[in-house]
């Protein structure tokens, strides 16, 4: 066995990568303020339910429990997504091991995750997307084991897949694409023989039971998520098209990483990794489902062929000359991870970041139909909230005590409402509301209100909404 293949050190490189990731996210992540979506999720955590207009409840339940124990400071909000990101690094490395890889492929798989800019961006703030990586990879681990286990072992593994899918759906409904991919993989691979047993059906039943409370909530509230998705596709999200979607994967997941996940997918289909063809089917089905959506929707699925590609590269570099090339390959991926870091981790001040992006010739990409400034959206939407709250507080303080009892604060979108709730607590502001996302279902708050302080709304908007 070569010096890269010692089982005793298989996980060392992965742990180093995970530790580096944690150090970056927790050491520098809190340098920039709270992100727009986090402010909204904190408001959701004040209204626990089995569902929300734009997402299921799992991540909100976790956030509410975490906040009860550790508060909602900036550092506290960053810990859970950072831990989920570190787990993603380790799980991707572990998947390479399950696919037959040794120390080098495990280390390369872990390093390649860090070379995906979108990974740092997604795990840089609290959201369900950080947990989504973990659920997809857990499902991939289980599928890989199912593909090489005997019947008795598969009988024990199938229920675990159902639990992972059920919890994953409670976290993010896009896991439904994973379920569709798994169903197709079962039919198209030798796993279809298990359909004659109760095991895959038990897995499906477990998943349905776990997600059932959210389905009931949808029914009780008139399927608001269906309307949300339809409106987002029509008015909010930019349709990249098939070619644009593929280009976005290369850009956002790291140009160098395409040298892993593209060959890795082929290897899973027709190469020595063919016994894990179930994973390839899942990826292809996921790609077809997500290709009309935002580019980052595919990020969790891409980790699977990424791990496979790491195993393929390891097997191609087995001869003496190949062994000498391995450190060079790892160095290339480390460099690929370092260059875009300031764009996805707050290492620089905003002004210096703009200059750094200019030197690299990078222009912020917009996945939504709105204007974008000099900063990437995942950074730009962290600034200005405290200043906005201060301005609104001045307007609130200008009211008499009697007027305040009859007043409400209404904003044009969920970010403004969430910010006013988060930063306005110490300024004595009431809970702001909105007609955006789940704020609509929570209502105006004060049924006796006759005075409205509008934020981000024109006089015509206020007259239309409140007469």
Image: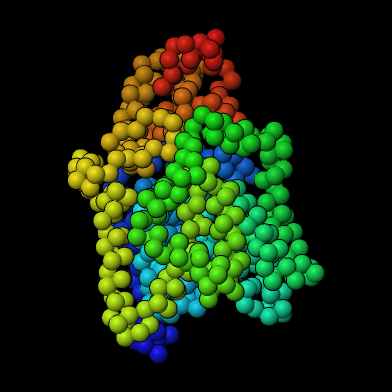
**Residue at the extreme bottom of the image, as rendered:** 1
Coloring basis for residues: rainbow
Q: Position of residue 322 (x, y in %)?
A: 33, 80
Res. 285 image quadrant: bottom right
Residue extending furthest toward the front: 270
Query: Height in image: 427 above or below 268?
Result: above
| Horizontal arrangement in the rendering, residue 278 relative to residue 396 (left or right) | right
Residue depicted at x 68% and y 55%: 210
Q: Is residue 376 left or right of residue 155?
A: left
Which quadrant of the rendered structure holds the C terminus?
top right
Query: For the point 40% across and 77% down, which residue is it?
Result: 316
Question: What residue sits 63% from the left and 57% below the top?
Answer: 181
Give the camera-side residue of 66 and 260. 260
Left or right placement of residue 115 versus residue 280 in this view: left
How many badges with numbers are in the image? 0
Q: Is residue 94 visible?
A: no
Q: Nearer the viewer, residue 202 or 417?
A: 202
Q: Is residue 318 left or right of residue 361?
A: right
Q: Position of residue 214 (x, y in %)?
A: 67, 45
Q: Position of residue 283 (x, y in %)?
A: 55, 58
Depth check, front residue: 414 or 312: 312
Please provide percent x and percent y for residue 93: 44, 70
**Camera-side residue: 242 or 96?**
242
Q: Quadrant of the N terminus?
A: bottom left
Vertical arrangement, residue 463 with respect to residue 271, above or below: above
Q: Is residue 188 above or below residue 328?
A: above
> Which residue appears at 72% of the width and 74% of the height?
155
Looking at the picture, does residue 72 appear above or below residue 115? above
Q: Report whether residue 256 is seen.
A: yes
């Amino acid at each position: 066995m070569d010096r890269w293949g010692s089982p005793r050190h298989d996980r060392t490189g992965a742990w180093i990568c995970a530790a580096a990731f944690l150090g970056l996210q927790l050491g520098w992540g809190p340098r920039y303020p709270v992100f727009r979506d986090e402010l909204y999720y904190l408001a959701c955590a004040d209204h626990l339910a089995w569902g929300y207009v734009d997402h299921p409840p799992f991540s909100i339940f976790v956030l509410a429990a975490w906040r009860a124990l550790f508060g909602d400071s900036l550092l506290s909000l960053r810990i859970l997504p950072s831990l989920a990101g570190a787990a993603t690094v380790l799980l991707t490395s572990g998947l390479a091991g399950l696919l037959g890889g040794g120390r080098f492929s495990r280390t390369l798989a872990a390093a390649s995750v860090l070379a995906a800019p979108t990974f740092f961006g997604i795990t840089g703030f609290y959201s369900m997307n950080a947990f989504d990586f973990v659920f997809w990879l857990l499902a991939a681990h289980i599928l890989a084991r199912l593909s090489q286990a005997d019947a008795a072992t598969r009988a024990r593994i199938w229920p675990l897949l159902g639990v992972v899918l059920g919890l994953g759906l409670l976290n993010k409904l896009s896991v439904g694409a994973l379920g569709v991919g798994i169903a197709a993989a079962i039919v198209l691979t030798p796993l279809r023989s298990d359909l004659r047993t109760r095991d895959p059906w038990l897995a499906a039943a477990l998943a349905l039971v776990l997600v059932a409370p959210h389905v009931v909530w949808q029914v009780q509230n008139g399927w608001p998520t269906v309307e949300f998705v339809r409106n987002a596709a029509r008015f909010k999200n930019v349709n990249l098209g098939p070619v644009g979607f593929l280009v976005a994967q290369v850009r956002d997941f790291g140009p160098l990483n395409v040298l892993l996940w593209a060959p890795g997918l082929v290897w899973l289909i027709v190469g020595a990794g063919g016994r894990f063809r179930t994973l390839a089917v899942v990826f292809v089905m996921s790609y077809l489902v997500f290709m009309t959506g935002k580019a980052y929707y595919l990020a969790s699925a891409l980790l699977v062929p990424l791990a496979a590609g790491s195993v393929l590269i390891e097997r191609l570099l087995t001869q003496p000359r190949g062994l000498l090339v391995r450190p060079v390959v790892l160095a290339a991926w480390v460099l690929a991870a370092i260059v875009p870091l300031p764009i996805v981790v707050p290492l620089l001040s905003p002004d210096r970041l703009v200059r750094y992006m200019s030197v690299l010739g990078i222009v912020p990409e917009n996945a939504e139909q709105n204007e974008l400034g000099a900063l990437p959206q995942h950074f730009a939407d962290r600034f200005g909230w405290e200043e906005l709250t201060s301005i609104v507080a001045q307007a609130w303080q200008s009211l008499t005590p009697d007027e305040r009892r009859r007043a409400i604060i209404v904003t044009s979108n969920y970010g403004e409402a969430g910010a006013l709730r988060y930063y306005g607590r110490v300024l004595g502001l009431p809970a702001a509301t909105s007609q955006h996302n789940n704020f609509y279902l929570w209502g105006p708050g004060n049924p006796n209100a006759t005075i409205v302080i509008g934020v981000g709304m024109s006089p015509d908007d206020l007259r239309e909404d409140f007469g």
